[in-house]
Amino acid sequence: MEEVEERKNQNDFSQGSPLSHIMKMALPMMLAQAASILYNLVDRMYIGRIPEIGREALTGVGVAFPVIMIFTAVANMFGTGGGPRCSIDRGKGDLDHAEKVMGNAFFLIVVFGIGLSVICYAFKRPLLYLVGASDATIGFADQYMSIYLIGTLFSMISLGMNNYINAQGFAKIGMMTVIIGAVLNIILDPIFIFLLDMGVRGAALATVISQFISAAWALKFLFSKKAILKFTLDRMRPDGEIIKSIFALGFAGFIGVATNAAVNLVANGLLKNLGGDLYVGAMTVITSLREGLTLVVMGMVNGAGPVIGFNYGARLYKRTRECMKIAIILSLSFNIAIWAVTMLFPEALIRIFNSDPQLIAVGVPAVKRYYCLFFMLALMAAGQTCFLSLGKAKQAAFFSLFRKVMLGIPLMFLLPYVFGLGANGVYTAEPITDTIAGIASMSTLFLTVWRKLKNTPDGEPID
């Protein structure tokens, strides 16, 4: 009993300064997300500089991105589907249920990871053509995916289970999960790509090895005595109710990543028809930048998630609102800063990947169009973090679908063809989507959840 009480009181977010707790979580999570950018960015930076074939190889790896995002989406579903539940359970003092949630999430990641790897390998080339590969780029895309698919389970474990390290308040350990893999990837990339002359295959192999080490680090901690939640084999026994709750809340995270993959798929197909491989290459750079920039922002904002969930579970609603307010301010601040960088230095950002004059000529105006209202994404990011942290599955899932499926994809068809913007219309769809979805998400948060938290006294059950 003493051990259980000691674990319940460890990383107690209901005491002390909410801002202090959030920053202690947010800074390591932001650094972790910044490091995670390096997994894909470093690959593409080196690939884009392979002599003679750099631009085509970069485009080939870029068109494989939507397939890779399928695995990220599934890992995200089981991570975000259970992580907030664990934070809320910790706030309630119910460690037993939190451990079962974590164990069931691991079970789901392993089953889906193996199954998806087999299916994607069997239909690899048709999938790559579907997402925008051409005869000029299919070879590079195939080479990359053939090796990358070997390590997708490791990637899913490190990405998905890191949510449960952060949910226990160990943000620095979670940060190391990502940094170890990212640093190793930086070291191995030039060795495999250039020194061993493996090209695109070398980039994929470096990533697989790095992901394996990251997964091993995460599991080593979760099975250790330092963890608050005990990760044992009996906790991995499938529980129908728990699995249902993970899917319900995790669906929003899955939709968020899956719809990004769908948008990339549609964008690549449209740009291939409207402008050719050069415009697809420009979108590869844009999506690579967006992935990195968004992850940094989300790392900072998501640092508030475990603190919001813990206080909500403890029925401290005034404190919960204070944590939500901090999340919104942090999101706005970082998004505005990133927006300014993209507007001021678009060419420098493109040159990180490739210095081809044609790519720069197309890419600079494309970047400016795509990111011109990026700061509005702050409202959507903060809103989703709050919905997920409070276990509001329906709202989180709706806005994930609303932003990309109901707005983004239709606009990518309407703007080029109906409004005559051509390839520029594909890039212009994003700022319109960010603005409408951000305003809608934040308005809903304040009119529903915030109002209910404000009108319910601390300690009382909330409807």
Image (cartoon, rainbow, N blue to C red):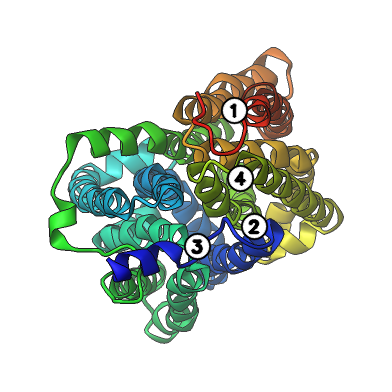
Answer yes or no: do the residues labelled 4 and 1 have beta carbons within 8 Å? no
Dot 4 or dot 1: first in sequence order is: 4
- Nearer to me, 408 or 363: 408
Q: What's the residue type where badge 1 is placed? A: Arg
| Residue 283 image label | 4
Q: What's the residue type where badge 4 is placed? A: Met
Quadrant (top left/top right/bottom left/bottom right) for the N terminus: bottom left
Q: What's the residue type where badge 2 is placed? A: Met
- Nearer to me, 213 or 361: 213
For marks 1 and 2, give the one nearer the viewer: 2
Q: Residues within 10 Å of mark 4 (few under 14, many from 20)?
A: many
Dot 1 or dot 2: first in sequence order is: 2
Q: Residues within 10 Å of mark 1 (few under 14, many from 20)?
A: many
The answer to whether residue 354 is visible is: no
| Residue 403 image label | 1
As measured in the structure, the alpha-carbon distance from the residue carrying label 2 to the one carrying label 4 is 26 Å
Dot 2 or dot 3: first in sequence order is: 3
Q: Which residue is located at x 81 percent, y 55 percent?
A: 337
Q: Which residue is located at x 39 percent, y 47 percent?
A: 89
| Residue denoted by label 2 | 300
Answer yes or no: do the residues labelled 4 and 3 have beta carbons within 8 Å? no
Q: Residues within 10 Å of mark 2 (few under 14, many from 20)?
A: many
SS class of the residue under badge 1?
A: helix
| Residue 136, x across and y down, in percent | 44, 49
Establish if 152 lies above or below 387: below
